[in-house]
Image (cartoon, rainbow, N blue to C red):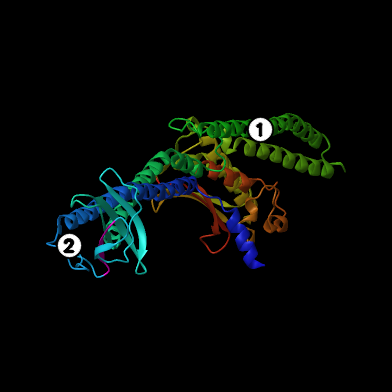
């Protein structure tokens, strides 16, 4: 069963365009190689056989030159019955001849040697392939009247030499064609790699984009064949971006519409609280004020979260942000609340600047300090730090509160999740603070880390920004 699963996974594995092009190119090249070798073989066989046939015919003419009439009028051939093979002959080469009359009477040579059929060519010779002494032979017969009598001179030789010549040329052509095909394949391989570079660049651009990036892909230098795909992707990204912006606008409008009536409701409750001071309904009005405050806080957080979406910000929104100055402003606005809770709020700032959206970083620091104040007991302390460590700017809020258990440090980044420490301490909150911080960190290419407090208690919220260029 496991083998079947692996096999199905391999069958679903996509193949690259590069490999498919090579596979489509390799098969025709192999067929072309086979066809080329076959054509070369066919082209060289006839000339080689003609050359060897010509050599064989010269042997027949040499025998004719040795035929002469004897003193008694009989023809005499000055050759042994079985002449030795030609010079440089191999052991598997044999040569036979026969001089005969048209009626088949043998005058000299091997009487059992057959005669080629009388189908003379332009040079007066007739050729054929025969089996003689259980071996293949090439046979040539020459019919002549040069001695005054009609004679048939037949010569035969084994085709080993011509076969070896054909074999050598076949090997030479095969090597030559193979080298040429290999060179064509290498050139095609380089050409395919060069031709696919725009696709590789496009792939790297898409792979290097953050998941929240919805801006359109550039269409410059995109091959014509891929341009419709890029245009379709850009159209899809545009529709997704419009959908995201629509959701953001809806959430922002909804939160904004809530803020106005909530502000009026809070004002009316404050007036009612003063008018009902000392009455039994005072406690209920206080509870109602707390609920309205939480609702207003949730609406503000929703509005901030909607505005913190990465797709809502462009490169022009990012400016140089001085972190010590940012820390000073946020501490000034949070100091009274910290003192009211009996918490020591301080800063340890080193000069450092980052590129970011100022109001988003301001909101992040506000949320981190707000969380720290909510979860730090009376007499505790909160320290805000910034600086550069290992070439990366950082911003952190370190408190001496109850801390966050290790198993919850990933969950607290989720929207509307309230940690156990919030429930145990009765701290108000809607579970959006750290979700906003995490979202803003991703907008800035930074990373939010939840660490143990430096004093051994509490928690340290640290944002590490990208390295300085």
- Residue 399 seen: no
**Which residue is found at the position 74% from the left and 40% from the top?**
295
For the residues labelled 2 and 1, the Cα–Cα distance comes to: 109 Å
- Residue 426 seen: yes
Quarter of the image that includes the N terminus? bottom right
- Of 148 and 138, which appears nearest the observer? 148
List x then y, in percent, for residue 91.
Answer: 24, 70
Q: Secondary structure at mark 1?
A: helix
Mark 2 crowdedness (10 Å alpha carbons): few <14, some 14-19, many ≥20: some
- Of 158 and 115, which appears nearest the observer? 115
Q: Is residue 339 above or below residue 406?
A: above
**What is the quadrant of residue 70 in the picture?**
bottom left
Q: Which residue is mark 1?
A: 243
As for residue 100 lying within the magenta part, the answer is: yes
Q: Secondary structure at mark 2?
A: strand
**What is the quadrant of residue 66 in the picture?**
bottom left
Q: Is residue 453 above or below residue 263?
A: below
- Of 164 and 294, which appears nearest the observer? 164
Q: Which residues are magenta?
A: 92-101
Q: Which residue is mark 2?
A: 77
Query: Is the C-beta separation of discs 2 and 1 under 8 Å?
Result: no
Q: Residue furthest right?
A: 280
Quarter of the image that includes the C terminus? top left
């Amino acid at each position: 069963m496991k083998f079947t699963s692996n096999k199905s996974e391999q069958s679903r594995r996509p193949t690259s365009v590069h490999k498919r092009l090579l596979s489509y190119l390799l098969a025709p090249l192999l067929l072309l190689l086979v066809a080329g070798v076959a054509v070369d073989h066919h082209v060289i066989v006839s000339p080689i056989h003609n050359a060897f046939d010509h050599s064989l015919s010269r042997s027949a003419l040499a025998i004719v030159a040795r035929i002469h009439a004897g003193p008694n009028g009989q023809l005499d051939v000055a050759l042994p019955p079985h002449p030795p093979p030609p010079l440089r002959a191999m052991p598997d080469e044999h040569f036979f001849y026969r001089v005969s009359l048209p009626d088949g009477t043998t005058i000299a040579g091997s009487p059992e040697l057959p005669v080629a059929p009388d189908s003379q060519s332009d040079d007066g010779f007739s050729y054929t392939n025969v089996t003689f002494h259980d071996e293949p032979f090439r046979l040539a017969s020459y019919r002549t009247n040069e001695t005054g009598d009609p004679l048939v001179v037949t010569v035969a030789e084994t085709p080993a030499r011509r076969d070896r010549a054909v074999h050598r040329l076949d090997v030479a052509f095969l090597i030559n064609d193979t080298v040429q095909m290999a060179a064509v394949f290498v050139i095609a391989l380089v050409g395919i790699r060069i031709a696919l570079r725009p696709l590789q660049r496009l792939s790297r651009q898409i792979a290097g984009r953050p998941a929240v990036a919805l801006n359109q892909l550039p269409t410059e230098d995109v091959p014509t064949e891929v341009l419709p795909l890029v245009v379709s992707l850009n159209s899809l990204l545009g529709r997704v971006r419009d959908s995201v912006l629509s959701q953001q606008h809806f959430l922002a409008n909804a939160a904004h519409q809530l803020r106005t009536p909530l502000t009026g409701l809070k004002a009316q409750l404050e007036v009612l609280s003063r008018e009902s001071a000392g009455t039994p309904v005072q406690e209920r009005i206080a509870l109602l004020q707390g609920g309205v405050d939480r609702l207003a806080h949730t609406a503000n957080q929703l509005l901030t979260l909607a505005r913190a979406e990465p797709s809502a910000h462009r490169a022009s929104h990012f400016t140089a942000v001085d972190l010590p100055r940012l820390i000073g402003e946020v501490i000034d606005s949070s100091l009274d609340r910290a003192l009211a809770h009996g918490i020591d709020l301080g800063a340890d700032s080193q000069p450092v600047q980052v590129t970011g959206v100022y109001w988003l970083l301001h909101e992040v620091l506000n949320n981190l300090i707000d969380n720290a104040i909510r979860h730090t007991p009376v007499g505790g302390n909160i320290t805000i730090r910034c600086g550069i460590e290992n070439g990366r700017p950082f911003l952190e809020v370190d408190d001496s509160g109850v801390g966050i258990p290790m198993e919850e440090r990933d969950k607290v980044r989720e929207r509307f999740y309230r940690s156990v420490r919030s429930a145990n301490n009765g701290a108000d909150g809607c579970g959006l603070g750290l979700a906003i911080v995490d979202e803003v960190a991703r907008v800035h290419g930074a990373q939010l880390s939840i660490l143990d407090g430096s004093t051994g208690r509490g928690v340290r919220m640290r944002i590490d920004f990208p390295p300085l260029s």
